[in-house]
Amino acid sequence: HEDNLKAWKKHVGTMKVIMNCPDENNVKAMCTWETRNKTEEEQVEYWRRMYMRMHDVGPIPRCIFNDNKYKNRVEEIDNVLAGIDASNATQYDMIGGKEMWPSNDAPHKLVKVVRVKTQRGLEAFVNLPVCFSIESKLIAKLLEVDGKNNIIYRLLKCRKELLADASERYAPNAPLSRVFM
């Protein structure tokens, strides 16, 4: 029952953890299903809108497919980024690492938990920015408030995961790009 869940979340003090995000192809399939009875132009426009939302807030279905939740998520991201200053920049050191999240929930709104394989073939979890646009804004903000912040080092440590994500996203389209040729 939804009311019981809301009461439990309020009582226990739970927070949203983002993990197991769908990839772009899965979101595109969801869009195709949602617009299956629409014209081709409507389908293209719907996908374009959802793609832009995914770029803004990450591939989080509950946020990209719901107008109110999307707007709330954009506002939430903007508020968290605006709240970063030199006094709390160290709370973001967990990004790119495997450390526990700080007790305040600001960083949770910008990262997702990603399962990775270690060099020994074991599974581990790493905290990465939810999407590239949030990652870019976060790096810019952290460098603005504290030039010595080690976020760049952290993200470089996770370059394999980040490059795997980027290559999975962009490599299939590379041969179609004029720049590639």
Image (tube, rainbow, N blue to C red):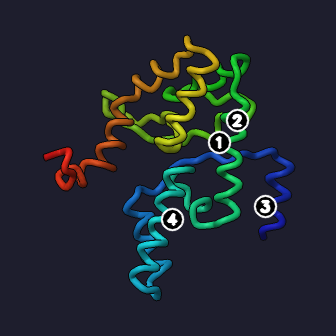
Residue 75 percent location from the top left of the image: 70, 48
Marks 2 and 3, Cα distance to the nearest angstrom? Answer: 22 Å
Mark 4 / mark 3, whichever is N-terminal: 3
Residue at which label 4 appears: 49
Asked if labels 1 and 4 touch by Cβ distance under 8 angstroms, the answer is no
Q: Viewer-proximal residue, 108 or 64?
A: 64
The residue singled out by tag 3 in the image is 5
Contact, mark 1 vs mark 2 (Cβ under 8 Å): yes
Task: Give the structural element (helix, strand or loop) at label 1.
Answer: helix
* Residues at marks 3 and 1, CA–CA distance in whole angstroms: 20 Å
Q: Position of residue 52 (x, y in %)?
A: 49, 57
Residue 102 percent coordinates (x, y): 69, 28
Point out the tag, 4 or 1, that comes first from the N-terminus: 4
Q: Residue 106 carries which label?
A: 2
- Residue placed farthest to the bottom in the image? 37
What SS does tag 3 mark?
helix
Residue 88 drawn above or below residue 47: above
